[in-house]
Amino acid sequence: MRVGFLGPRATFTHLAVQSYFGEEIEQIAYSTIPQCIDAVAEGEIDLAVVPTENALEGSVNLTIDYLIHEQPLYIVGEIVSPIEQHFMVHPANKEAWRNVSRVYSHSHAIAQCHKFLHKSFKGITYDYATSTGAAAQYVKNNPEELVAAIANKLAAKEYGLEIVQPNIHDYHYNHTRFAIVHPSVDGKYASKKLTAEKEKTTLMVTLPSDQSGALHQVLSAFTWRKLNLSKIESRPMKTGLGNYFFIIDIDMRVDEVLIPGAIAELEALGCGVKLLGTYEAYFIRQEIEEGV
């Protein structure tokens, strides 16, 4: 089993992979989310784990748009992981960490630590990396630069960095949702380390053009069947201003009656409906320990 993730090693995505799959699979890092998704579509790896949503920063639009417009893979599983951000420097700069000239991390990580950075490093330069792991790797490889990274504990251990300020995130209830994607809707791999706590189905819905009340009718198709929607989000179709599709999460797997009935009703209204996945959701209750 080969599983790809947004690398390098010790990103939050890598932590999710380790928690879900353990060490029994081959873990392959990719430098960008599109490269990771392409690798699954081309058969280079069996599954990929990619971030889809953060509790503070919202949806990872790059992931959603690439799965919709470029590589139409299926979501076959979901991992929800807590996010803890730490301020770290090269050991050579441990004593001078308050004088760092730059902070390097993923844009979401920097945004999640705004209060700490505004209070302690007002006016400092922020440089954006492709991942928190890439930022930590950069700090390791450039000890002559007085630069800090924001990343997780595993990144500090992996790259030999010194955590000088732990838990600098603005809000303690911060989680990221990761999707496990595969070319087949049935291509799931059940976790042997975590227990599934929820079942979900994700649909993509496009509305008929120039029809008033269409979104209300869409929601009604789920409401009268008592299907609970945990998320509804609009994204641009990229075909012109005002053209959108909707991502809808339903809190159950596809059954034989209710969800097929709702889909049939939506199609009868002139909507386009596409199944993006029906799967189990797993929750990581604690941060993965160092060395796991």
Image (cartoon, rainbow, N blue to C red):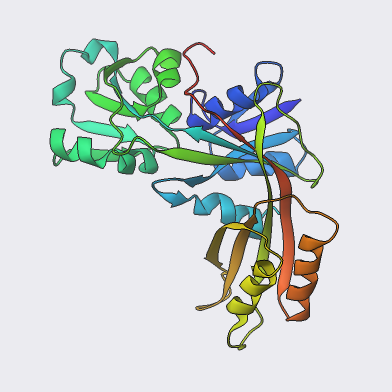
Residue 40: quarter of image: top right
Residue 269 placed where, x, y %?
73, 81
* Depth check, front residue: 36 or 211: 211
Residue 158 placed where, x, y %?
45, 15
Q: Is residue 86 visible?
A: yes
* Depth check, front residue: 67 or 22: 22
Residue 94 placed where, x, y %?
22, 13
Residue 169: quarter of image: top left
* Depth check, front residue: 15 or 147: 15
Image quarter of the N terminus: top right
Image quarter of the C terminus: top right
Residue 58 placed where, x, y %?
44, 51
In this figure, what is the number of numbered marks? 0
Residue 88: quarter of image: top left
Q: Is residue 75 visible?
A: no
In the displayed structure, would residue 273 be above or below residue 97? below
In the displayed structure, would residue 127 be above or below residue 151? below
Q: What residue sits 41% from the left and 23% below the top?
A: 137
Please state if 134 lies on the left or on the right of 7 as rendered.
left
Q: What residue sits 21% from the left and 23% below the top?
A: 146
In the displayed structure, would residue 204 be above or below residue 100? below
